[in-house]
Amino acid sequence: MRQTVHKFAVGRFEFAFNILYLRISLRMRKTLLLAFVLGLTATLFAQEYRLVWPKNNYVFSTDTVNFKWSVVDDAVSYDLQFSADDPSFNSAITRTGILGTAKQEILLLSKAYYWRVRAITSQGTQDWSYAFRFDIFEPPQNSGLMLWFEASRNVTAPPGGGPVSQWVDRSPTPITATQAGANKPTLVENVNELIGKSVLRFSGGP
């Protein structure tokens, strides 16, 4: 009988396991191999989280945030944790016992937030997921801001995007931009390069 230790890495995870060599029959070897593979698969996928929303480095202009994450197999409930200006989560707020994969929160403006989740399964409380950051930006009413157009807000366009007929800025003294001609700018939603933000595209024509 002899024993060896093997290590390997998968993405951000490193795994170590012992192999105990015994003089056993071929049938017993197959049984042990199957049990090992099942155990290794459970280890690999038990902690698979996917933070869906907010995306990493997303910038909000509203204080209402809808957190969303992926389903974890065998999860009974989830815990959500978020912190303001604290990536170490030392002063974080934790919401426990969430039955679904979404939670709405109203947060303070002009802060950088970090968030993560963990699942509670039949095996117990799992480790926290990786963390994402997002920011909430909202200038004060007395900031002196004179013009603020945002493609994700106050845009009059067909559902799902298309020609824009009106665009209202978000400054304390709002100005309405209108386009009556045929050559209108186009609203494009959920642009991947801008972390899901919307944009207005102008053709540059008359």
Image (cartoon, rainbow, N blue to C red):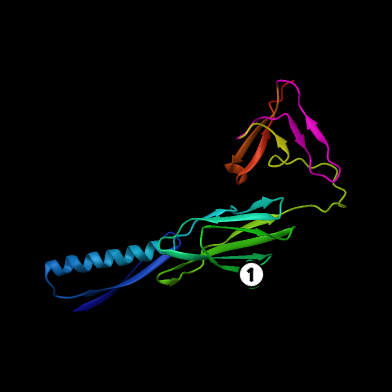
Magenta includes 180? yes
Q: Quadrant of the C terminus?
A: top right
Q: Label 1 belongs to which residue?
A: 92
Residue 89 location (% of width, % of height):
62, 70
Identify the amino acid type marked 1.
Ala
Magenta includes 132? no
Residue 59 location (% of width, % of height):
67, 51
Point 66% across, 61% down: residue: 113
Residue 87 vertical placement versus 195 (above, below): below
Q: Residue furthest left?
A: 25
Left or right, 81 with reference to 8: right
Q: What is the total number of numbered labels drawn onto the structure image? A: 1
Point 25% across, 67% down: residue: 35
Point 21% across, 69% down: residue: 32
Residue 108 location (% of width, % of height):
73, 61
Residue 145 vertical placement versus 84 (above, below): above
Left or right, 60 with reference to 77: right
Per the picture, the main secondary structure of the magenta-coloured stretch is loop
Which portion, as a residue range, is magenta? 160-182
Q: Residue furthest bottom?
A: 1
Quarter-of-image position of residue 75: bottom left
Q: Please tell me which residue lies in front, 140 or 17.
A: 140
Q: Alpha-carbon neighbours of circle 1 within 10 Å: few (<14), some, or many (≥20)?
A: some
Secondary element at image label 1: loop
